[in-house]
Image (cartoon, rainbow, N blue to C red):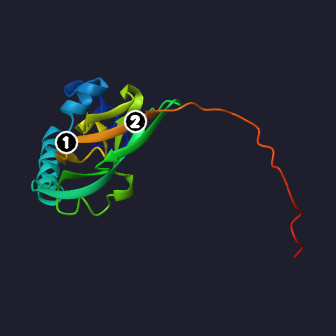
Amino acid sequence: TLENPDDITKPLSNFISGTFPKQNYSTTENLLKHNSPEKIVSLTFAIIFWFFFSFQAATTQRDFKIPVTYKNIGEDVLVESTKPDIATVTLEARGSNAFDLLDTQALSIAIDASDLKTGIQKVLVTEDEVVKPANFSIINIKPQEIDVSVKSVKNIRMTVVPNIIKDLPSG
């Protein structure tokens, strides 16, 4: 018989640690072995909920009229004209509301002007020139070729001295 309930604590602890020794796992082993069934069930439910609520398999396409702009224009080059100066680009995204937050002002076609030569030339518009958010895909670009007229110019710095003939009337 026990006279004091605290007297059983030490023999009981010794019995449990001797019968069921505590195993020291590394962090990775503990992550994989501890509560594994609960983790598998939780992950399964998370994937199922993601498919039902977040994943949108349907894609949506829209056409946008996008202006043609130029980058890397040299100081001695002037782009006189671009025909046409607006191209129609068809974008595609997942989900019906993908286009709701799209800033259409941020869309552009940026042609690299560093390789343009003097005169009229045809430039191929590729997907690389279309500036768009990463979650959109390009389906079509019309027209795929544009005519660009380039002129060679020379910058001259000069002082202008006005020749005043008569004083202006007051008032």
Check disc 2: other Cα within 10 Å, few if <14, some if 14-19, many if 20+. some
Residue 144's label in the rendered image is 1
- Name the residue: 34% across, 45% down: 82
Q: Amino acid at mark 2?
A: Val
User: Where residue 132 sits in the image (x, y, percent)?
Assistant: 31, 46
From where the camera sits, is residue 22 visible? no
User: Where residue 72 sits in the image (x, y, percent)?
Assistant: 45, 32
From where the camera sits, is residue 91 visible? yes
| Number of numbered labels in the structure image | 2
Of mark 1 and mark 2, the one earlier in the sequence is 1
Image quadrant where one finds the C terminus: bottom right
Quarter of the image for residue 104 reads bottom left
Q: Residue furthest bottom?
A: 171
User: Where residue 109 sits in the image (x, y, percent)?
Assistant: 32, 44
- Name the residue: 25% across, 47% down: 135
Secondary structure, mark 1, is loop
Secondary structure, mark 2, is strand
Q: Nearer the viewer, residue 149 or 70?
A: 149
Residue at the spot of label 2: 150
Quarter of the image for residue 113 reads top left
Residue 82's place in the image compared with 94, above or below, is above
Q: Nearer the viewer, residue 53 or 67?
A: 67
Image quadrant where one finds the N terminus: top left
Q: Amino acid at mark 1?
A: Gln
Q: Nearer the viewer, mark 1 or mark 2?
A: 2
User: Where residue 30 sits in the image (x, y, percent)?
Assistant: 25, 30
Q: CA distance from mark 1 to mark 2?
A: 19 Å
Residue 7's place in the image compared with 101, above or below, is above
Q: Nearer the viewer, residue 77 or 125?
A: 77
Q: Nearer the viewer, residue 36 or 75?
A: 75
